[in-house]
């Protein structure tokens, strides 16, 4: 194989690395990996995880409550009484109260 073929493979690897990387928000990394490592760099680019976009929320929704956790009647009444004033008198559902309790416990334990 002539040098022209190797240069063509090298340039194509850099271009394809940039294209594959752009789909994962890693165009620069894909280009450099393709440029420096050729076909091996393309393989690395393919298995790289997508980089999250700044300011974009995750598509996965966080759980609304801790699985299997239930509020006792006294916990619910206590939390609801304390939070009713904050919520403008609106009644809160159990999942919201559990979530508030979990966040509060995490804040207090850290």
Image (tube, rainbow, N blue to C red):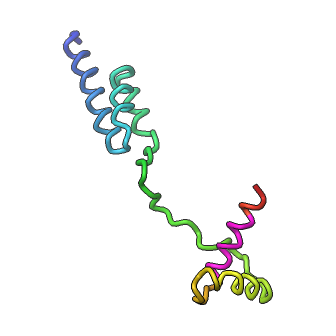
Residue at 64% x, 85% y: name it.
84
Q: Quadrant of the N terminus?
A: top left
Query: Which image quadrant for residue 64?
Result: bottom right
Q: In this view of the protein, which residue sits in the foreground, 14 or 104?
A: 104
Q: Residue furthest top?
A: 3
Main SS of residues in magenta: helix
Residue 37 appears left or right of 101: left
How many numbered markers are drawn? 0
Query: Which image quadrant for residue 38?
Result: top left
Q: Is residue 49 above or below residue 41?
A: below
Residue 104 in magenta stretch: yes
Q: In this view of the protein, which residue sits in the foreground, 102 or 52?
A: 102
Q: In this view of the protein, which residue sits in the foreground, 36 or 100?
A: 100
Q: Is residue 79 above or below residue 36?
A: below
Q: Quadrant of the C terminus?
A: bottom right
Q: In this view of the protein, which residue sits in the foreground, 38 or 5?
A: 38
Image spot of residue 61 (x, y percent): 51, 66
Which residues are the magenta region? 94-105
Image spot of residue 87 (x, y percent): 59, 82
Q: Is residue 110 above or below residue 46?
A: below
Residue at 22% x, 10% y: name it.
3
Residue at 66% x, 73% y: name it.
100
Query: Which image quadrant for residue 14?
Result: top left
Residue at 33% x, 36% y: name it.
27
Image spot of residue 28 (x, y percent): 35, 31
Residue 103 appears left or right of 37: right
Residue 75 appears left or right of 39: right
Image spot of residue 54 (x, y percent): 42, 48
Residue 9 in magenta stretch: no
């Amino acid at each position: 194989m002539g040098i022209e073929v190797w240069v063509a493979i090298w340039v194509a690897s850099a271009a394809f690395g940039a294209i594959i990387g752009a789909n994962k928000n890693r165009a620069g990394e894909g280009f450099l990996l393709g440029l420096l490592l050729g076909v091996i760099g393309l393989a690395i680019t393919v298995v790289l995880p997508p980089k999250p976009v700044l300011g974009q929320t995750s598509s996965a929704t966080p759980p609304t409550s801790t699985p299997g956790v239930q509020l006792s009647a006294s916990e619910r009444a206590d939390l609801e009484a304390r939070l009713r004033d904050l919520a403008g008198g609106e009644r809160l559902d159990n999942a919201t109260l559990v979530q508030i309790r979990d966040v509060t416990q995490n804040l207090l334990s850290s």
